[in-house]
Amino acid sequence: MTSWATTPARAAVVVSGAVGKLLVLASGMVQEPGGAPLAVSGYVVLSAGAASRIFRVRGPGRAPTVDELPAATTIDLRRFQKELEADLQGDLEVLRAKGHPAHIEPSSAEWLCAFVRAHLLDSEGLEVD
């Protein structure tokens, strides 16, 4: 069974003195047997008016990559859900082939946002609360 977390989750952020918010638009993860995150995929928006940005988080659960999407990206929740399902499908198949009843489940908004915060700090020196 596939389940999705598309309700925006909020976390405070400060961008160049302006207050903005990190919002999780879509998220999913596959857990290893025992509960550790095997893989994650999600979309996070830094909502800051005209300076808003969208980030894609995906990859291994312990160290996913964070990529910023082009400025003209349309927020399309259905597309984001389909893309994260495709991102996680390979991990699901590997676990199921080993007999584990794996599925996609929502990831924690705070956990997903932490990867975006770290990316912004490392790549731009921008500290985000």
Image: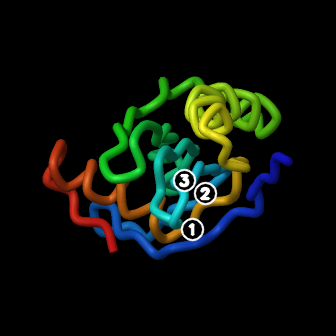
- Placement of 29 over or under 72, stated as above or below: below
Quarter of the image for residue 18 reads: bottom left
- Placement of 103 over or under 118, stated as above or below: above
Residue closer to the observer: 48 or 9: 9
- Residue on which the image places disc 3: 49
Residue found 34% across the figure and 37% down from its top? 65
- Helix, strand or loop status at disc 3: helix
Instruction: Residue 24: give its label.
Output: 2
Instruction: Residue 98: give its label.
Output: none
Indicate the amino acid at tag 3: Gly
The CA distance from mark 2 to mark 1 is: 9 Å
Residue found 42% across the figure and 37% down from its top? 59
Dot 2, crowdedness within 10 Å: few (<14), some or many (≥20)?
many
Quadrant, the C terminus:
bottom left
First-in-chain label (1 vs 3): 3
- Residue on which the image places disc 1: 108
